[in-house]
């Protein structure tokens, strides 16, 4: 079984010319889920990304998230998926 990335290494995602480094934890993922509301999906993803990005990259990331439509959700999905380290879930009958 592959060990989830948040227990072993940061997640690095390229957005344009910049490689952003994220270090999500189980608590970050749980906070995201707890913050989700039927009419509020972007704010929890935004908070997750800005909490988990390398501190010196936060201003640059915030500038992108505030100016590129749809980037917050797409980037959240990428970082969240990568942080699971390729773990797959399947239903057996």
Image (cartoon, grey):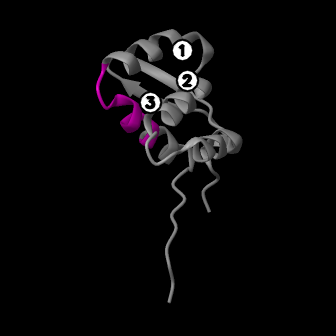
Q: Is residue 52 above or below residue 41?
A: above
Is 34 or 24 nearer to us in this picture? 34
What is the quadrant of residue 24 in the picture? top right
Residue matched to label 1: 58
For disc 1, the neighbor class at 10 Å (few under 14, some 14 to 19, many from 20) is some
Q: Quadrant of the N terminus?
A: bottom right
Q: Tell which circle, 3 or 2, labels the residue nearer the N-terminal end.
A: 3
What is the CA distance from the residue labelled 1 to the residue labelled 3? 14 Å
Q: Which residues are magenta?
A: 68-77
User: What residue sits 53% from the left and 35% below the top?
Assistant: 44
Residue matched to label 2: 50
Asked if the stretch drawn in magenta spans residue 70, the answer is yes
**Secondary structure, magenta segment, majority class:** helix
Residue matched to label 3: 13
Is 26 or 1 nearer to us in this picture? 26
Describe the element under mark 1 as helix, strand or loop. Answer: helix
Q: Are marks 2 and 1 in contact (CB under 8 Å)?
A: yes
Q: Tell which circle, 2 or 1, labels the residue nearer the N-terminal end.
A: 2
Asked if the stretch drawn in magenta spans residue 41, the answer is no
Q: Tell which circle, 1 or 3, labels the residue nearer the N-terminal end.
A: 3
């Amino acid at each position: 079984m592959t060990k989830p990335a948040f227990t072993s290494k940061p997640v690095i995602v390229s957005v344009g010319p910049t490689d952003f480094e994220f270090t999500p934890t189980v608590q970050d993922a749980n906070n995201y889920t707890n913050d989700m509301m039927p009419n509020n999906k972007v704010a929890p993803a935004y908070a997750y990304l800005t909490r988990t990005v390398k501190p010196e990259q936060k201003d640059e990331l915030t500038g992108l998230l505030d100016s590129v439509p749809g980037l917050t959700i797409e980037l959240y999905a990428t970082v969240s998926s990568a942080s699971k380290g390729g773990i797959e879930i399947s239903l057996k009958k």
